[in-house]
Amino acid sequence: MAPTANPFIPYAPVTFSVSESLERASDFYTFMDQRRSIRDFSDKPVPRNLIQKLILTAASAPSGAHKQPWTFCVISDLALKTQIRAAAEKEEYESYQGRMSQEWLEDLAPLGTDWQKPFLETAPWLIVVFKKAYDVQPDGSKRNNYYVSESVGLACGFLISAIHQAGLVTLTHTPSPMNFLSKLLNRPANERPFLLLPVGYAAENVKVPNLARKSLEEMSVWY
Ligand code: IYR
């Protein structure tokens, strides 16, 4: 039997005049261009309902066959953050002491990173994003998801934008390997850790590496 399609419903796109669009695009670029990855966090609290809105925004991202193949694990419990920090630092120590190539370490040098990850305890919230390779139906059978990494990557992009828009800061942290997160957070077999984002306010007088973004000419080709 052919699968039944959902009925279509009317949609009213948000539109602006060309000059309004130009101004909005320009303002949005200026705002987004001010975003920086932050590694030094304040312990100033952030309310739970604010984090909830950020996650709803992340989950508004498009996904393959609209499968929404993501789970957001949201952590504020200090004991759990401490466990995550200890496990992440154990892996990162091994990585920085030999698992990463010399070339990789050289490329990272301008960022000033090392195996120590105090932000995993200082930031008021950690969001660990899991990708779901498949869904488990109520009867226990497996149902496939599509373009899972692309979909979850898009949701993370939306999340990072929402965090910035709310005046908070984050960092895309990828401790490697990440499977300790599945154990600590008790996640099922169809979920794999994808990205860890500490969320909060920047530490006072925070500094960031002096990085430049590629110019339009460097990063685009027009046909
Ligand atoms: N996961 C390590 C190393 C690291 C790798 C890349 I690529 C970065 O852009 C930054 C760090 C860490 O979190 O320190």
Image: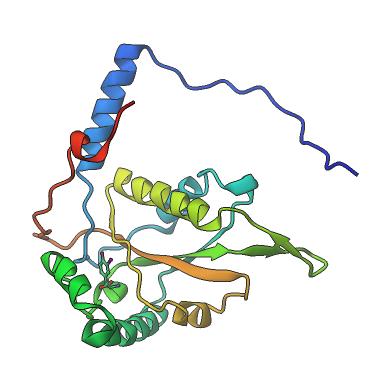
Q: Which of 136 and 127 is in front in this view?
A: 136
- Taking the spot 64% from the left edge, 51% from the top edge, the residue there is 67
- Taking the spot 32% from the left edge, 67% from the top edge, the residue there is 173
Q: Where is residue 40 in the image (x, y as percent from the top left)?
A: 19, 66
Residue 127: image quadrant is bottom left
Residue 94 in the image: above or below residue 215: below
- Taking the spot 29% from the left edge, 83% from the top edge, the residue there is 99
Q: Position of residue 134 (x, y in %)?
A: 65, 63
- Taking the spot 31% from the left edge, 63% from the top edge, the residue there is 45
Q: Where is residue 72 in the image (x, y as percent from the top left)?
A: 50, 62
Residue 116 in the image: above or below residue 21: below
Determine the quadrant in which ligand 1 lies. bottom left
Can residue 162 be seen from the camera position used here?
yes
Q: Position of residue 181 (x, y in %)?
A: 46, 77
Can residue 127 be seen from the camera position used here?
no
Q: Which of 106 and 24 is in front in this view?
A: 106
Residue 53 in the image: above or below residue 201: above
Q: How many marks?
A: 0
Q: In this view, does 205 lie to the left or right of 44?
A: left
